[in-house]
Amino acid sequence: MTTRGTGRARGFTLLEVMIAVAIIAIALVAVLGAQSRSLSVTDESRFNTTAALLAQAKMAEVEAGGEQALVSRSGDFGENFPEYRWVLSMERVVFQGMEAVSDRFRRIDLTVSYGNTAAYRYHLRWYAFLSQGT
């Protein structure tokens, strides 16, 4: 606030008000940016937690199904998780010089995805040794 020689308060100048408004605007932009990043991290964290649990459940289901369950296929997780889908793929693993073992060794990949975006994908890989070649 500025004063004149008479001792009367004149109020704030336009320049002082513009500087104050600019400082408040910069602070608000920073706060809103942090809030946006916080929401994004929360969504990603929620997906990673849910996808990991769903992948473990699907893996346990496949392992409980035995060797006949080890086929490539895909599906969803039902109405409890409507946007989540899974893809299971199985490949033979070949070791050169060890064909007898390679015939029974499988690499299983399970991918859990959310929605149509590639940003939300969770991948799980494990290996299985079959009792008989399939």
Image: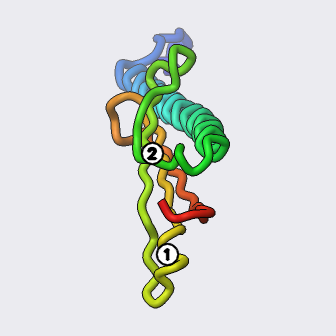
Q: Which mark is residue 102?
A: 1
Secondary element at image label 2: strand
Q: How is the image coloured?
A: rainbow
Where's residue 49, x and y in %?
Answer: 63, 37
Q: Residue at x 41, y 46 (%)?
A: 72
Is residue 45 in sight in this rendering?
A: no
Mark 2 Cα shell of 10 Å, populated few (<14), some (14-19), many (≥20): many
Residue drawn at (35%, 41%) of the image: 118
Q: Would residue 82 be found to the left or right of residue 61 on screen?
A: left
Q: Amino acid at mark 2?
A: Leu
Residue drawn 53% across and 57% down?
125
**If you read the primary sequence from the N terminus, does the residue marked by circle 2 or circle 1 appear first?**
2
What residue is shown with label 2?
88
Q: Nearer the viewer, residue 132 or 74?
A: 132
Residue 96 vs residue 80, the one in the foreground: 96
Between the C-alphas of marks 2 and 1, the distance is: 20 Å
- Residue 22 vertical placement versus 49 (above, below): above
Residue 18 image offset from top left, x and y in percent: 37, 23
| Image-quadrant location for residue 19 | top left
Label 1: which secondary element: helix
| Left or right: where 16 falls relative to 60 | left
Looking at the picture, does residue 13 appear above or below residue 52?
Answer: above
Label 1 crowd (10 A; few <14 / some 14-19 / many >=20): some
